[in-house]
Image: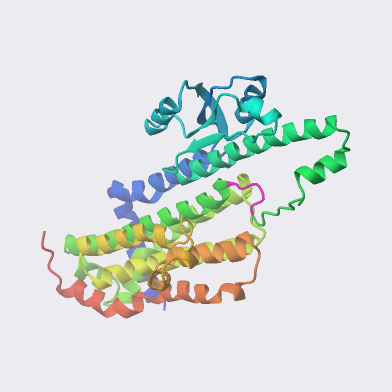
Amino acid sequence: MLLVLRRIYELSLRECKIFMRNPIYVFCMVVFPLAVMFFFTSMLENGQPQGMPVGVVDLDNSSTTRALIRRLDAFQSSQVVASYPSVSAARSAIQNNEIYGFLYFPKGTTERLLSGRQPKVSFYYTMTSVTAGSLVFRDLKTVTSLGAAAVGQATMRARGFTDAQIRTFLQPIAIDLHQIGNPTTDYNAFLSTMMVPGIMMLFIFLITTYAIGTELKFNHGQLIMQMGGDRIWVTLVGKLLPHLLIWLTLTFCYSFYVFGILEFPHPGGTGMIVLLNLLMVFAAMGFGVFAFGLMPSLRMSMSISSLWAVLSFSMAGTAFPIMGMDAPLQALAWLFPLHHYSVIYQTCVFNDFSLLECWWHVAAMLAFMLLPMMVAGKIKNAMHTYVYIP
């Protein structure tokens, strides 16, 4: 046992020396992951996009329409930046990406509104960006509804109706809205906790395969097998142990940053976050070793890892819900560690449910950790016999 630990120590020490000689490790394991963490959390620090540019086409130019424009400009997510003389000019502004939408008041809007002849107020918005389009649509629809309600309130008040009667008439059904888990609709708490771990998995996949593949590229396979006593598990553990410690340090620091400093909601508790981080790092490294064993070539294994990591963002279920995909894609999603990470996070950390609610996904993460067992023999054979072809 002491001999095995000594071999692991010597391999780990050798790997640390490689870290210091090769700047790729420093950049891909420290600099770039830290840059990604601060980039995404700072980009979304306001929770939602704010001050998105919108325009108006006010051919009526009355006090009523100007009041509605001021209300639109007062919304947090929209900012009126321009007034256009015609619909065609405002449409050109949308096509040139100058504004995300505009509100159109035709001539005679106020007159028809006060006389009860139901004027038509139009709003146009772009859905090229789904998030921006949805938020602008919400603001444009709200401001037109508020305008109609204000006129109705003034008319009914002039006729002697009480405030309670006016409220009942204008809003027959009162909506009691509860946004569970993320009551402030904070995009930062929702997206950063998926995007950053996904990119971290990308780095883990690539660096794990790169670290093993470069041993073959520089014809050091037999050397590290000799250092490991010709036991593939001792060799892999010794070589990847420094990687494991660095990745775990980064993930725990990120969790402390977002949950401790930025105070992202985590009713599931600290213990669940620690468990999820452990599952993520071990599963990602297990998949990286498996990718190399599947194709014991530096170029091919890194290509597989990068392809799988990029596809993970689409199959995680964050951008598009898994339940809305076709059945074959729903089955395919089980082959991506990020999907299981997402489900466990949303179930156990974000919503404070028991692990039993998603135990299949926990089992899948454990299966990714054990994938190297399927290819250990192939990796050992490659270390002894593989000849690198540039």
Q: Which residues are magenta?
A: 182-186
Does residue 268 appear left or right of residue 291 in this picture?
A: right
Colour setup of the view:
rainbow
Q: Residue 129: percent from the left, percent from the top?
A: 44, 43
Tell which of 130 and 211 is nearer to you: 130
Tell which of 375 and 309 is nearer to you: 309
Above or below, 379 against 195 in this view is: below
Residue drawn 65% across the image and 25% down it: 111
Above or below, 318 against 87 in this view is: below
Above or below, 267 against 4 in this view is: above
Tell which of 238 and 65 is nearer to you: 65
Residue drawn 20% across the image and 60% down it: 299
Q: Is residue 183 magenta?
A: yes
How many numbered dots are placed on residues in this image? 0
Q: Main secondary structure of the magenta part?
A: loop
Tell which of 334 and 171 is nearer to you: 171
Q: Is residue 171 magenta?
A: no
Does residue 390 appear left or right of residue 149 in this picture?
A: left
Q: Residue 375: percent from the left, percent from the top?
A: 29, 77
Residue drawn 66% across the image and 64% down it: 352
Q: Residue 169: percent from the left, percent from the top?
A: 79, 44
Above or below, 360 against 191 in this view is: below
Residue 55 appears in the figure: yes
Which quadrant: the N terminus? bottom left
Which quadrant: the C terminus? bottom left
Residue 215 appears in the figure: no
Does residue 215 appear left or right of residue 276 in this picture?
A: left
Q: Residue 365: percent from the left, percent from the top?
A: 46, 71
